[in-house]
Image (spheres, rainbow, N blue to C red):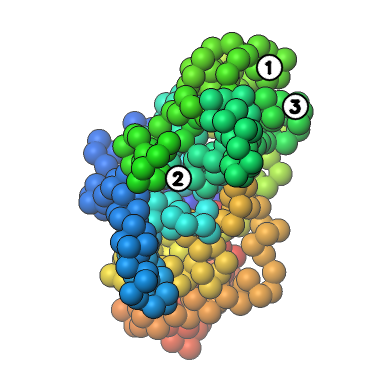
Amino acid sequence: MNKAVIAANRFGLGARPGELQRIARNPASWLTDQLGGPSRLPAEIRALPDSASVFGEVQDVRRSQRATKRDEPADDIVEKYGRVVRRHYLEQTAARYRTAARTDTPFHERLVHFWSNHFAVSADKQPLPAIAGLFENEAIRPNVVGKFVDLLRASEQHPAMIVYLDNQRSIGPDSTLGKRANRRRSEQQFGLNENLAREILELHTLGVDGGYTQQDVTSFAKVLTGWSIGGTNDKGRFADGEPGKFEFREIIHEPGSQYVLGRKYSGRGIDQGEAVLQDLASHPSTARFLATKLARHFVADEPPGELVDRLASVYLESGGELSSVYEALIGATEPWLDAYAKYKTPHDFVISTLRAFDHVPDNPRFIVGALDLMGQTPFRPGSPEGWPDTAVQWGGADALYKRIEWSNTVARVVGSRVNPVELGDAVLGSAFNPETRKAVSRAESLAQGITLFLASPDFQRR
């Protein structure tokens, strides 16, 4: 397998017809040139409203529902809310996959998707379906080539993450509101919520074996009290702040110093939490955890230990500069070896198919339906852990049958307009195995040949 093929498929999102020839001039430079990112946001992304606007719209719908629920059947009220949420969800999904299918900087786009999955929010709870895609665009996309601490801070302070992990409900026991609640039994539902603190330590920075304790989780949760969003109700204690934007609420922040990982944090307000994030971002356990995930994603399910060590060292030496880590990954030997390969997730399979045919469906439901069929519904990983990144979770007879089923659908849509052998040569190059090529060429029809090509091990791996 030549380096152009690896650059397009392992680092990128799959080759488009004619792309391998352009990459072949200098595959490594083709990748490093993308680390600056697109000069402007893709048009599909620019056209979307921001999360604060969508959050405000959702709140307005809920407010009008409360005002009219006495006069309207409950089913009508739910349907109105559902229409608003579905519209935003489909618009964001369409923008994401159209961008991925068309982009000239697919390595940069893969990095966006990688970090979006690392800092996973799931559209399983309201109002996340309406803003999960905007989290990727606002917190992840602008920060994938900067310092990790900036990406970390932007992700943890985004309203989607705050709401997903219920941190707006976390109230320090000795905060102004917490003390008041202790005196009023009617407000006993208020208390400390450890979700955000635990996921930052376990999934976003140190890793499950990173050396933290339950006491660190509790102390960090106290540090993060007050990290909330503006305008969460119409009046009262949480009415202030711009609706749908990050808001620090002193009234619910736990006062005083806290110890996290043996270090004392005596700062006040939001600075206390940001100081912890800064130290977590520079921790050796974070360096190793992130290096392992990157090596697993770009090289192999069982990443080479020496590569992980080198990436972790570059991370620490550069002060968490992500571009330096990416450059070390590109410059390493391991990602360019034929011995390694990754089994495509449904997400990768769908995007690489769209790129191979250089086509984006007009109806976003086609993409959502395909990914739903194969078990990777957009923006819905089901847990803060995100989607799995190894073949064992995506293999199996049933999963392969669903991929073949979707390949059949694509073949029916394309019909006889594409020659599958020519397509294989164009997007796989030297990775198009002669035996696979022979089988595809002997198919009874062009449509059957397309199905065989898309379902082949050659196309299913990157």
Q: Residue at x 53, y 73 (%)?
A: 373
For the residue pair 195 and 212, the one nearer the viewer reads as: 195
Q: Measure the alpha-carbon separation of dots 2 and 3.
A: 26 Å
The residue that label 3 is drawn on is: 215
Q: At 57% from the left edge and 30% from the top edge, which residue is drawn?
A: 180
Q: Which residue is mark 2?
A: 160
Disc 1 designates what residue? Answer: 259
On screen, residue 188 above or below 251: below
Going by the numbered disc 3, the residue's amino acid type is Gln
Q: Residues within 10 Å of mark 2 (few under 14, many from 20)?
A: many
Q: Name the residue at 39% across, 45% down.
A: 233
Characterize the local packing of mark 1: few (<14), some (14-19) or many (20 or more) Cα atoms within 10 angstroms.
some
Residue 268 drawn above or below residue 289 = above
Residue 240 falls left or right of residue 377? left
Q: Is residue 271 left or right of residue 209?
A: left
- Mark 1 or mark 2, which has the lower sequence index? 2
Q: Earlier in the sequence, mark 1 or mark 3?
A: 3
Mark 3 lies on a secondary structure that is helix
Quadrant in which the C terminus appears = bottom right
At label 1, the amino acid type is: Tyr
Q: Position of residue 23 (x, y in %)?
A: 37, 44
Quick check: 116 above or below 181? Answer: below
Query: Looking at the picture, which amino acid does disc 2 mark?
Result: Ala
